[in-house]
Image (cartoon, helix red, strand yellow):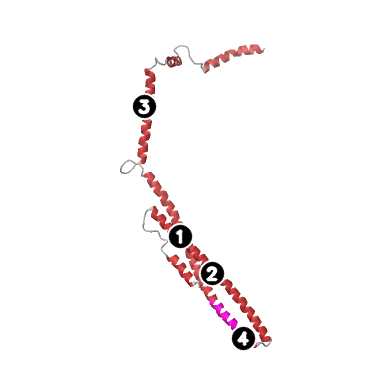
Amino acid sequence: MLEPLISQLKALFAGTGFTPRDGRSLQDLDASIRSAAFTVRTAQAALAKAKAEQAMDRKRLRQLNGAIEDLENRARNALLKGAEQLAREAAEAIAVQEDEKAALEASINSFDQDLLSLTDHLHRTQARLRALKRGERTAEVREQIHKAHSLGTGAGQSALSRAEEQLEEISEHQERNQLADREFAELCPAEKPGALIEKLADAGCGAPVRTQAEDVLARLKSDMPLMIQNQH
């Protein structure tokens, strides 16, 4: 009953689904790993089914042992009571069940060895698949770093070069606008006499047009003697 399942499992493990294809692109590698992962999942399911079948056979073996023991006790009872024919029938049934028991024990013992081998093979295959997935992640990172490193190299302008040129153009344009604003203000002082007066006052030419912090502080200090006198 289990021979076809054993052959199926061995075929799964012996398959080429675990080896990446010759393609060097990340897309090909991803496809190969997906195929390998599917094969591993299929093998896991088949192995689980095989172990379940083995558990059922062990249960059947326990049932046979119980039935044989029961029949033997009943056959002895029949012999004690002189029921020779009944004892013979029980003996014939015991003989059939013992043959079935022997065949089942042989099958279970043989399949135990296969299961050990297949389980070990599956574990090693799963380890290889995990290593492949780690390698794929490393390859993806390297690919992205290579793309970033290659920006600005090669024929033609890269996106990075264009971005740098655009930033430089924007900075130059802003600088030109600022210079133009200052030059315009210098050329038109008559249109803004207030600004010119403020500029002259800040340079100490004439009375200040804005209240200075130093002036406020001096005024506060001058008020101190009067405040002290009023308190007395």
Q: Earlier in the sequence, mark 2 or mark 4?
A: 2
Residue 47 position (above or below residue 101) = above
Q: Secondary structure at mark 2?
A: helix
Q: Secondary structure at mark 3?
A: helix
Give the amino acid type for the residue marked by disc 4 in the picture: Arg
Give the amino acid type for the residue marked by disc 2 in the picture: Glu
Residue at the limit of the structure toward the left, as seen here: 155
Q: Which residue is mark 1?
A: 38
- What's the mark number on residue 176? 3
Classify mark 1: residues with Cα within 10 Å, few (<14), some (14-19) or many (20+): some
Residue 139 position (above or below residue 152) = below
Classify mark 3: residues with Cα within 10 Å, few (<14), some (14-19) or many (20+): few
Give the amino acid type for the residue marked by disc 3 in the picture: Arg
Q: Main secondary structure of the magenta part?
A: helix
120 vs 86, nearest the viewer: 86
Q: Earlier in the sequence, mark 2 or mark 1?
A: 1
User: What's the CA distance linking mark 4 and mark 3?
Assistant: 118 Å
Q: Which residue is mark 2?
A: 53
Query: For residue 64, which quarter of the picture?
Result: bottom right
**Where's the C terminus, which quadrant?**
top right
Rendering coords of residue 218 (x, y %): 55, 15
Rendering coords of residue 157 (x, y %): 32, 40
Do the numbered discs 3 and 1 sit on residues whose CB atoms are within 8 Å?
Answer: no
Q: Which residue is mark 4?
A: 88
